[in-house]
Image (tube, coloured by chain):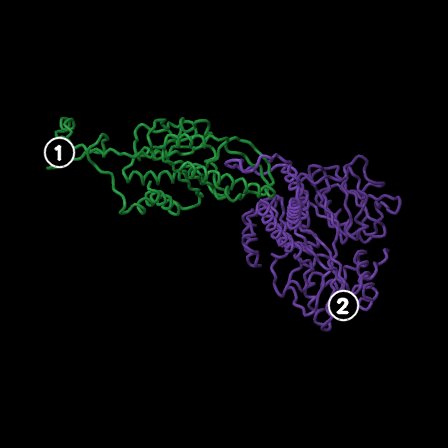
Chain colours: A green, B purple
Amino acid sequence: MAQRLVDGYLAGHHRSPRPGEGAELLQFRAYEPGDDLRRVDWRAYARSDRFFVRESEVERDIVIRFVLDATSSMAVAEAGTEGSKLDAARSVVATLAMLADRQGDRVLLHVVGARAGSGTPRGGGRGLSGLFSQLESVEAGGEWGDRGLAKSGFPPRRRRDLVVLVSDLFQQGQEIEEDLGRLAAVGHDVIVVQLLHRSEHDFVVPAEAVFRDAESGRRVAVATAGLRSEYFARRDAELEHWRQLCARRGHAYRLVMTDQDLSEWLPLLLRSRRANGR
Amino acid sequence: MAAPPASKPKGQRPLSWRWLDPSWLFGILAVVLPILVHLWGRGRGREVVVASLRWFGDGVSTFARRWRPSDLALLIVRCALVMAMALALAQPRAATRPVAKEGTWIVVEPAVLEEEQGRLRLEQLRAESPQSEVRWLVPGAPPVGDGQSPAGADRWRDDQWAALAAVGEVAPPGVDLVLLTRDRLAALPGARPVLTHDVTWIALETPDSVDWLGTESHPVIRRESSAEATRLEMSVDEDIAGRTGLEVLVEVAPERREDGALARRAVESLKSRGWRVSLASEGGGGTVRILLGLPDLPDDPALPDGGFTEGARWVLLDGEGPERACRGTVRPSQVVPRPFPMMRCLGSEWGRPLWSAPDGQPLLTQTASPDRTIYRFASRLHPSWSGLDATGWADWLEERWLHDGLLPSEVTPLGLDRRRSFSNEQEPRRAGPPSEVSPRFHPWPETVLWWLVAGLLLAERWMQRRRS
């Protein structure tokens, strides 16, 4: 899905990663006449008695850090389906990462929350493949918590990166807001993608049920008929709050439903950023 | 004599009900299940995991779920569903009780008027429709005058289909026929007649009882009693026949002396098998115990002089005849419980033996009630039936049933102690639409109930979906 989308969107517009000289090894290939002798790997020659040329990826300047919200609230599936918000977030991150990789940017993934032992970078994989394996292994669990971003391995250094936060932005207190404030303070360029289920947005729930908060575990039995107007008021207020917060801090913000096709909104998001000179 | 019931208005036919499998009525008790489920589910709700309760508001608190009208409606539908299923499985049949009217012939089987029940029923029909004519169920349909059976009635005793066809020929067109017979008509051989008249069949139910008399380990005599007759059958095993000290008491009401003929035959039969037989009579009340007083019994010097031997083991024989004669006083100690399943109709006059063993013992009997025909098989092999085996029976039966149009799937290989029943719907119809002469017990209540079950099921699903 992500591959198809990226191919369709990038065709003819973006450059591919360029093999050349640099610090990071991309691949070995057989020596061909005309190749720079300085790039011949003599150790490989000593081992195999054949000439191989080292090809390294050109050093990339932009680092794109994806911050994936993998707290328990992201594990909630849409009513009647098995697709969780985390699944949708995986698609978003994978698509954007592939897009960035095609442009030659470095991509890194930071997972906030997540079940213990899942979502940690594996030793063997780096770059896009490492990000994919990390995405694949992540399982939702826990809360964002205080300084959740820092706990996910996000470096505190003062270098401006592009940060893409994919989250439902449900927080117990102000923790996500605070972490976004720290990102803004460092000067990162931030894109916030808020993922919601359609049933969450439109309050499609049984008339009477015991509702359990996925993160806190709190249970309430509610007759939803009388709650609807208050729910919508609170929802609109909070969504407006996020919208204004992001605008105030210069973050790009996009509210996305999990049943929306990526091709519907991703090009719009990218074009709007390009129009803003980002 | 009981007073006849008040006449019903014309055209009003009270319903009569019958359950083919009434044991399913206990299934109505299962109605407590949905009630328990509702009580158990009260106060509980379906749990829904949400990402956050932030948008639910701070004032939300746990509440005790209360019953809504939709809950009560759902409970009622579920209870009705269970009850309707139980009732449908009990296979209800309904019939309109026939009411005689003008232009009606009440056609009576001669044997019916020999019984009190039949006479009462006829009086009832006459009271309901004084203008109706009462005719005998014999060819020519002569009017019933003083109640004396018409000449030659016995000839048609076992061929009442033919008699009914002959009645239909002489009955004027448009006359309704109300047929009053004993309930054995359906078991009669021959072709069911096709009649142009509207025929209503009233089949009198005959109470029956069957028991075995003899020693505990050896049931010797099988007695079948009904309002029509008592039939005795002797099943004498060799080891019983040689026993001594087994005596037989024949007890007959004095006013039914003609029954002594059967008693005599029974005694002679037993004697011929080497039994020591005694006859006894006893007075008291309206019953007289006769020892040697039966005029038809020959004097037998071997018989004891003043009653049966004290301390001897007694077996009671009844004489054939009407109800009164066959209800002799049976002492509890003389009645032996049946040690194995009973063959209800074997050899009786109102069950028709279809197949008999070489020694005359019936193996397969067809009997009928107004709503079903039942085939029964002998459940015991007699030593003299050694030439037969279960496979032979099965082959013969299958061949016969295929010939008669019964479904092959209904035929199962027979073993001992195997009994099968078939409803009347499966009985082969040889000619004519069966409704013309069948009792008017229709399955429509069962059909209606199954439709009701389907409707309730749909309603339950719809209400459940709407509720959630």
Name of the residue lying farthest toward the right: B285
Residue at image coords 13%, 32%: A51
- Residue, disc 1: A36
Q: Quadrant of residue B349?
A: bottom right
- Residue, disc 2: B105
In terms of depth relative to the viewer, which is nearer, B292 or A241?
A241
Residue B20: x and y in percent read 67, 51
Task: Name the side, left or right, on which B370 lies relative to B115.
Answer: left
Is B297 situated above or below B431?
above
Residue B259: x and y in percent read 80, 52
Residue type highlighted by circle 1 = Asp
Q: Quadrant of residue B447?
A: bottom right
Q: Chain of mark 2?
A: B
Residue A164: x and y in percent read 38, 36
Asked whether the residues under marks 2 and 1 belong to the same chain, the reply is: no
Q: Chain of mark 1?
A: A
Circle 2 sits in a helix, a strand or a loop, which is it? strand
- Crowd tier of the residue under label 1, counting other residues whose Cα lies within 10 Å: few below 14, some 14–19, many 20 or above: few
In terms of depth relative to the viewer, which is nearer, A46 or B174?
A46
Is B34 situated above or below B187?
above
How far separated are the C-alphas under marks 2 and 1?
125 Å
Residue B11: x and y in percent read 76, 65
Front label number (2 vs 1): 1
Name of the residue lying farthest toward the front: A248
Is B362 situated above or below A118?
below
Res. B302 visible in picture:
no
In terms of depth relative to the viewer, which is nearer, B460 or B273?
B460
Name of the residue lying farthest toward the bottom: B172
